Amino acid sequence: MGKVNRDIVASINTHGALAVGLSGEDGGLIEANRRDPELGFVGDVANINPAIVESLLAQNLIPVVSTIGADLSGQSYNINADTVAGAIAGALGATKVIYLTDIAGLLRDVDDQSSLIAETTPSEIAGLIADGVLSGGMIPKVEACLEAINAGVPAAHMLDGRVPHVVLLELFTKAGVGTMITSEDVA
């Protein structure tokens, strides 16, 4: 397991909760497919087997997953962490998935922090992309949110992880502080 995974586990444990570090290969959690041979060992999620995560959660342990998955032959692949988070959330039947990033959320104007889009839907996102409102580095995060929603998660939140207590502010205040993308069924 990598140093970052161990550091996150240690930090969680130091702050009063109990975490367990694992790789997506452990317990067959993440089944992967190779994305493109030219990219080397980069993969996509083929399937999530949530049993190991469910077992840890049942014991009040926080799983910290390194996003390495394996194909059926045992070959390991590095997979985008945001994509894996959404896929695991969907497999667990989660009601929300929260992505921490270094931006306030989706902005109508990247130069205007007050243009934050507080709530939107996949169909509205498609329009924002078509109109060029969302572009560049915003697209991968948005795609991860949409993949989570397609996996059955009703809401995906994008929050600025640099803001103190941002998760509490988003979930427990009326206005929230980031962007929430909800499935069309929820909206």
Image (spheres, grey):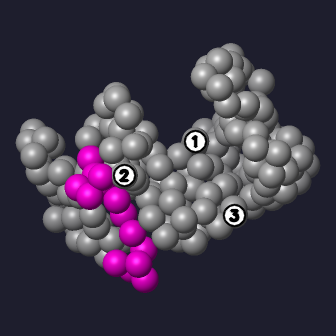
The circle drawn on residue 114 is none
Q: Is residue 26 left or right of residue 117?
A: right
| Magenta stretch in the rendered image | 173-187
Horizontal and vertical percent position of residue 76: 79, 39
Give the labeled residue for mark 1: 81
Q: CA distance from mark 1 to mark 2?
A: 26 Å
Q: Answer above or below: position of 69 versus 15.
A: below
Dividing the picture into quadrants, the one containing residue 153 is bottom right
The circle drawn on residue 91 is 3
Amino acid at pointer 3: Ala
Label pair 1/2, CB-CB below 8 angstroms: no
> Does residue 27 appear in the picture of this structure?
yes
Tell me the element at label 1.
Answer: helix
- Give the foreground label among 1 and 2: 2
Figure quadrant of the N terminus: top right
Amino acid at pointer 1: Ala
Figure quadrant of the C terminus: bottom left
Label pair 3/2, CB-CB below 8 angstroms: no
Give the labeled residue for mark 2: 172
Horizontal and vertical percent position of residue 150: 53, 71
Indicate which disc, 3 or 2, sits on the residue closer to the N terminus. 3
